[in-house]
Image (tube, coloured by chain):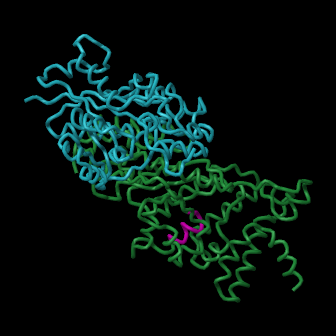
Amino acid sequence: MGRIPLVLLACGSFNPITNQHMRLFELARDHMHHTGRFQVVGGIVSPVSDSYGKRGLVPAQHRVAMARLALHGSGWVTVDDWESRQPDWTETVVTLRHHLQKLLGQQPSAADLQMPHSSLEGSSEPPQLKLLCGADFLDTFRVPGLWRAEHVEELVGRFGLVCVSRGDLQADRAVHESDTLFRHRHNIFLVREWVRNETSATEIRRALRRGLSVKYLLPDAVIDYVREHQLYTWQSEQRNKDAVLRPLGQQGAPSEPLNDS
Amino acid sequence: MELGSKLRTRVLKLRSFRRHMAIAVHKSFETVRLNFTRAVLASMSRNHPIPSGRTMSRKRPVGSAKRTRTARSFEQPKKTKVVLLACGSFNPITNMHLRMFELARDHLEDTGQYEVVQGILSPVGDGYEKKGLIEASHRGEMAKLAAESSSWIGVDTWESRQANWLETVKVLRHHRQELLSREPDTDVVGTAKAGRKRKRMDASSATKRRKLEEGPPQRSDEPRLMLLCGADMLDSFGVPGLWKPEDIEEIVSSYGLVCITRGGSDPEAFIQGSDLLWPHRHNIHVVREWVANDVSATHIRRALRRGHSVRYLLPDPVLGYIQERGLYTTE
């Protein structure tokens, strides 16, 4: 039996993209390859649209541009702006469906996917698309109103997760504590980097606001872009300050008990 | 004593006075008086050089002499120029090593007292004989590739070219002499003082003690060389037999330490508990790395041995160098 061709999709703010984001892809690829069952043929970075409403989110055109600069030298990870161009926020599952359809519909001569078509040839197995994420992503399933139950089911059942975390047991516990996740535990791949690396986009934005150096935490080209466009300031962090995250607003999450307005 | 009280008035306005008193307060009254006099003598020699026609140093705003010269009521304090030196295996160099420089520079400049003008990576020589240490020529090349994109960090291979392993303090002394010989000597006095300093480097312990109490003998325009390290190096000061006490003393008094914390260590507590370090605590700058980053060269070597990707943990040119030569594939 040949290896299953696998594409990893990472959804997120990428506000901005960091070395740590790109590490996730590298770690996931190594892990999935070492299972013996998969051949990772591509990676996709899909920045969320502006209507997500997250605090401090700078315009998608910038986030996409920075991701492209960062991944310029990567041989296998690309940036896709479909999600960011949608009129409204897109559920993760919808994004996954879109990309899987694209993947499956790919003809050997088609060049819309920027990966060599030969990676898909020579394998009798249909390609799979899995969501790449960090351990904290698993905890978001527990936030009331953030996910539809049927979407979680489709996400882990039909697609699958590749979840990169540190050596702690946070991800294991999240799988254990959710019946849905537990049922699909064989489709949830837990990848560990055994060292702590807590460099996050939040920290980087904070450093940039304060005029501190972020060199070596993200590619020079991205830092130059940020400087050129004066992207991350105190003002930019105030964006969406009082907004509700789009998924919560859309799915009619219960308002706070004490909010009588 | 009339002469004593005149000197006292002048010294009170010197910035270095605080440091001397901090040391002096913990000693007996007799020693306090002794240190005080020495401090006065030291400050006199700095600010009142051999009569050569020059007035008080124009570069450091000191006491009343400066104030009478200008009508301004507020003087911008002069910033001390700093050069950061990092010694290590750099086997291989990583983004974390380079981050240390950036964090240190931000921290020092944030105090408003310092201007970091240069960073030096000094890979250890092959004589160190640590397990898995690849040739110095490779490590130096990789460090150079890594530092290429930096405007202020560079590599010095002097240490790596020495036949035998050198104590850290010797590397510091070498680089300080390099800095001194680079500095333009604008007057005879400057050269004379530099010559005296070099002699003092090898002086007896009694003179060393005097030098310690004066603080580092600096010209006002000389960049201060500081050792940049992780908290683990600071902790290693406590390992019996690993460091000579007089070397530690020299490092923290004549130079200075900039220590980047890693998770799981408490540099301030360590300094607090060390009689050797505590008097020089103002010369030991602890930089808190708020975001934990434990990625180490050891981790990277392990990943390479196992055929795992280390991309984005170190600069791409360094990774390319490693891959081209098949480095770190075996133990």
Q: Does A183 sit above or below residue A79?
A: below
Q: Residue furthest front?
A: A260
Q: Is residue A102 left or right of residue B116?
A: left
Q: Quarter-wise, where is residue B211 in the image?
A: bottom right
What percent of the width, then of the height, locates residue B220?
72, 58
Residue A58 lies in magenta, yes or no?
A: no
Rendered hue of chain A is cyan
B39 or A53: nearer the eye?
Answer: A53
Q: Does A76 sit above or below residue A26?
A: above
What percent of the width, then of the height, locates residue A227?
58, 33
Span highlighted in magenta in the image: B247-256
Rendered hue of chain B is green
Give me the residue at 92% from left, 54% from top.
Answer: B71
Residue B248 lies in magenta, yes or no?
A: yes
Give me the residue at 76% from left, 59% from top.
Answer: B189
Secondary structure mainly formed by the magenta segment: helix
